[in-house]
Amino acid sequence: MELLEVRHLKKTYTNRFGTNQVQALRDVSFTIEEGEFTAVMGESGSGKTTLLNLLASFDRPTGGEIILNGLSFQNIREKDLASYRRKNLGFVFQDFNLLDTLSVKDNIFLPLVLAGAKPEEMKKRVMPLAKVLRIDDLMEKFPYEISGGQKQRTAIARALITEPRLVLADEPTGALDSRASNELLNMFEQINRAGQTILMVTHSTKAASHAGRVLFIKDGIVYHQIYRGDKSREEMFKSISETLTVMASGGKTYA
Ligand SMILES: Nc1ncnc2c1ncn2[C@@H]1O[C@H](COP(=O)(O)OP(=O)(O)OP(=O)(O)O)[C@@H](O)[C@H]1O
């Protein structure tokens, strides 16, 4: 089933004097099926964060449409956006965005607290998730007492606790060393195999090679895409590297 449809998305930033315009996204279209793990790659400034911010409904497009689970963002009133976001989306940011004054457990609970969930419901959900993410013995600790990888796994638990339809991840391995990155990527593969749909923006060829599909953005459009299919991770890594080389040299390929 189709979960997300992005139709002719455009985003133009205009400075406050209206004199300077940047066309960050010119015409981006793609669809994501339920259960897919998709990576979005592109050079710095190609519009990846802009795309993620639009998908997260943090910002409104200049043109085009985003339809999640059959509902167009255009039809959601501004005052309903926050609750729509909480119900449908989970976020994993590069810098974790954990609150230092809250324990690991309370950080994970935060989206449920905001959604007005009952304490029994929260307790029921947290331990199975914490076990899978191997943070079950860290629940009473504070973010400054745990490692980068453990922080990232806490951030993943927080993203998953609401059972979102779509997890959006922005450079999730950006602040991690290679061992913690590997762990995180394996974790993403594991939750994806369990049915979670993930869209991840990344600069890292290695991170993207864990995905089932990679979308390449260049000059504000989807320039190319690769499906993992039967490819091994190494073969996927090679295909992605080759595409990035072609893109950097200005060569033509077809989406
Ligand atoms: N708020 C803004 N106002 C004006 N221009 C912006 C704004 N945000 C982004 N841009 C411009 O839009 C273009 C796309 O930026 P974006 O941050 O989406 O790229 P990116 O692919 O995420 O880059 P990076 O990989 O470096 O994070 C760039 O030219 C950027 O300078």
Image: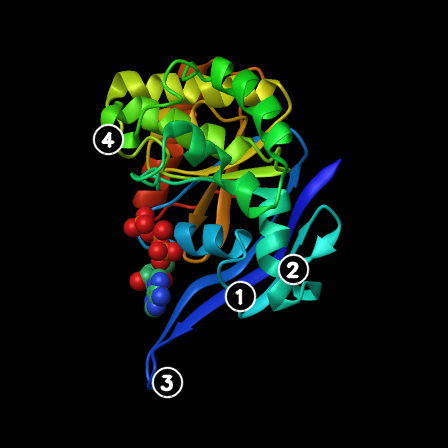
- Which numbered disc flags the more N-terminal residue, 2 or 1? 1
In this figure, which residue is indicated by the disc labeled 4?
A: 144
In this figure, which residue is indicated by the disc labeled 1?
A: 60
The circle on residue 22 is: none
Q: Quadrant of the C terminus?
A: top right
Q: Amino acid at mark 4?
A: Tyr
Residues at marks 2 and 3 touching, judged by CB atoms closer than 8 Å: no
Q: Amino acid at mark 1?
A: Arg
User: Of residues 134 and 198, which is closer to you in this image?
Assistant: 134
- Which numbered disc flags the more N-terminal residue, 4 or 3? 3
**Which type of secondary structure does the marked residue at label 1 adopt?**
loop
Gap in angstroms between the C-alphas marked 2 and 4: 37 Å
Residue 112, given in percent of the width and then of the height, sits at 56, 39
Gap in angstroms between the C-alphas marked 2 and 3: 26 Å
User: Of residues 223 and 152, which is closer to you in this image?
Assistant: 152
- Which numbered disc flags the more N-terminal residue, 2 or 3? 3
Gap in angstroms between the C-alphas marked 4 and 3: 43 Å
Q: Quadrant of the N terminus?
A: top right
Residue 25 relative to residue 79: left or right: left
Residue depicted at x 57% and y 43%: 89
Q: Nearer the viewer, mark 2 or mark 4?
A: 4
Residue 77 relative to residue 161: left or right: right
Quadrant position of ligand 1? bottom left
The circle on residue 18 is: 3
- Which numbered disc flags the more N-terminal residue, 2 or 4? 2
In this figure, which residue is indicated by the disc labeled 2?
A: 73
